[in-house]
Amino acid sequence: MIPKPNVLDEIGQLSLTELDALPIAQLDARIRQVGELKDTARQYEDALYAVMNKRFSERANQARQDAGKHTGTVRFEVDGYVVIADLPKRLEYDQPKLKGAVDALRKWGENPDDYVGIEIKVSETKYNAWPPAVRQLFEPARTLKVGKPSYKLELIKTGVIADAANDSNFGEVL
């Protein structure tokens, strides 16, 4: 079900104080309605871009070929509009093969840092399974950062609240 677009107008007319005063059920309903609108808008946008791709891809590919390139941005005119068609590069490298290439550079007496950037990643799952001495070795290089907080509302069913890591009272039957 697509919510009525006026839900955006309703929310837009309320101050943060008024929104804060909404009962949680109304807050939940508004969040769900806005989410449904975003999903619907994303589907419509995807359909419109699919039409543009169908309409312009052949001409864009020809313009790229004429320019001697396989990717990138080309411009051409259609019915008084300039169509800007971009086909970005999405490079992927096989990590084991890269490691082999870096090892080869070292054997040649070259410094790999002159050619590639090397980033070492540590899986948090593996880190937590390491012996304490190994964790202690890596601890000075480790920094915990947090992302943007997010919240989700779920209607309680059958009178049970799910367990939460921060409250031993959760999980009791209401």
Image (cartoon, rainbow, N blue to C red):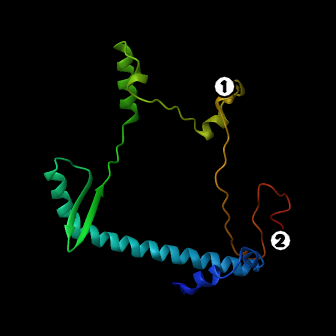
x, y percent for residue 56:
22, 67
The numbered disc on residue 134 is 1
**Helix, strand or loop at mark 1:** helix
**Picture coordinates of residue 146 (x, y %)?**
67, 48
Left or right position of 29 against 61: right
Residue at 78% over, 71% down: 160
Name the side, left or right, on which 50 lies relative to 164. Answer: left
Where residue 102 sits, quadrant-wise, is top left
Judge left or right: residue 171 versus residue 65: right
* Residue farthest left in this picture: 66
Q: What amino acid is labelled 2 in the image? A: Val
Above or below, comparing residue 100 to residue 66 in the picture: above
Q: Residue at x 39, y 31 (%)?
A: 96
Q: Nearer the viewer, residue 29 or 87?
A: 87
Name which residue lies at 63% across and 75% down.
Answer: 31
Q: CA distance from mark 2 to mark 1?
A: 43 Å
Where in the figure is residue 151, as x and y percent of width and height? 68, 64
Of the residues tagged 2 and 1, which is closer to the observer? 1
Location of the C terminus (image quadrant): bottom right
Q: Is residue 10 above or below residue 108?
A: below
Of residues 121 and 65, the one nearer the viewer is 65
Label ID, residue 121: none
Residue at mark 2: 173
Q: Nearer the viewer, residue 60 or 161?
A: 60
Q: Amino acid at mark 1?
A: Val
The image position of residue 2, as x and y in percent, is: 51, 84
Q: Secondary structure at mark 2?
A: loop
User: Residue at left 28%, top 73%?
Assistant: 51
